[in-house]
Amino acid sequence: PCPVRNRALAREVADRGAVLSEVPPGVPGARWRYPVRNRILAALADAVVIVESSGGGGSMHTVRAALDRNRAVMAVPGPVDSPESEGTNELLVDGAAPVRDAADVLAALGHPHSGGTSGTRDGAPPQRERPSGDAAALLDLVSWRAVSVEELARRSGLGFGRLSAALVSLETGGWILQRAGWVERLARTHSA
């Protein structure tokens, strides 16, 4: 395990559950293995949250792996003059959802959270009516990265009226969020 100070934690996890790796136990760590490990993390996650990363940091490998698997990518904003925030801030510019706290992550995944309005009073996940027709087809075109309304119009081939109606239906149903001409997915269809 890396860092070495986590060796006891790794043993405890293995004793109580499972450790997933493409590398046999006892093989020493190497820098080139981190992207392989991060690919596994991205595959297992519903969302990837990047807290801090330089522009070329190893976390960007995880982002690419997450995007390749249609996972949500979120980022914690950082100081604009900090090299350690260059990657996260660039992700935000590229359309990653901003994260201020755990509630932002839960909301993006469509789960209830304390103090919020996305869940029901008893804590059950919100019930979303599955979209149909134009709305269902349009939802398939909306990824976890923000996409412009113009791009959706081009991809879908829908006229303005049908496109607008489908977007309103998806937003009202809690499937997407629209901001300043951009559309972003909020929930997976299997969570309905």
Image: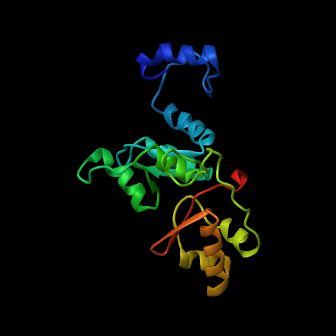
Q: Say which of 59 and 50 sits in front.
A: 50
Q: Quadrant of residue 176?
A: bottom right
Q: Quadrant of the C terminus?
A: bottom right
Task: Measuring from the top left, give residue 151's x and y in whole percent.
Answer: 56, 76
Q: Vertical placement of 161 versus 100: above or below?
A: below
Task: Measuring from the top left, give residue 145's x and y in whole percent.
Answer: 53, 60
Residue at the (45%, 31%) spot, across then down: 31
Q: Say which of 59 and 188 sits in front.
A: 188
Q: Vertical placement of 35 versus 26: above or below?
A: below
Task: Measuring from the top left, give residue 190's x and y in whole percent.
Answer: 72, 52
Q: Vertical placement of 81 versus 160: above or below?
A: above
Residue at the (34%, 46%) spot, across then down: 54
Residue at the (37%, 44%) spot, across then down: 53
From where the camera sits, is residue 159 visible?
Answer: no
What colour scheme was applied to this rendering of the protein? rainbow
Task: Measuring from the top left, give residue 116's x and y in whole percent.
Answer: 50, 51
Instruction: Answer left or right for 35 relative to 121.
Output: left
From where the camera sits, is residue 135 visible?
Answer: yes
Residue most extreme to the right? 133
Q: Say which of 69 and 78 sits in front.
A: 78
Number of marks drawn? 0
Q: Say which of 97 and 103 sits in front.
A: 103
Instruction: Answer left or right for 179 relative to 155.
Output: left
Residue most extreme to the left? 81
Residue at the (61%, 65%) spot, across then down: 142
Instruction: Answer left or right for 85 relative to 157.
Output: left
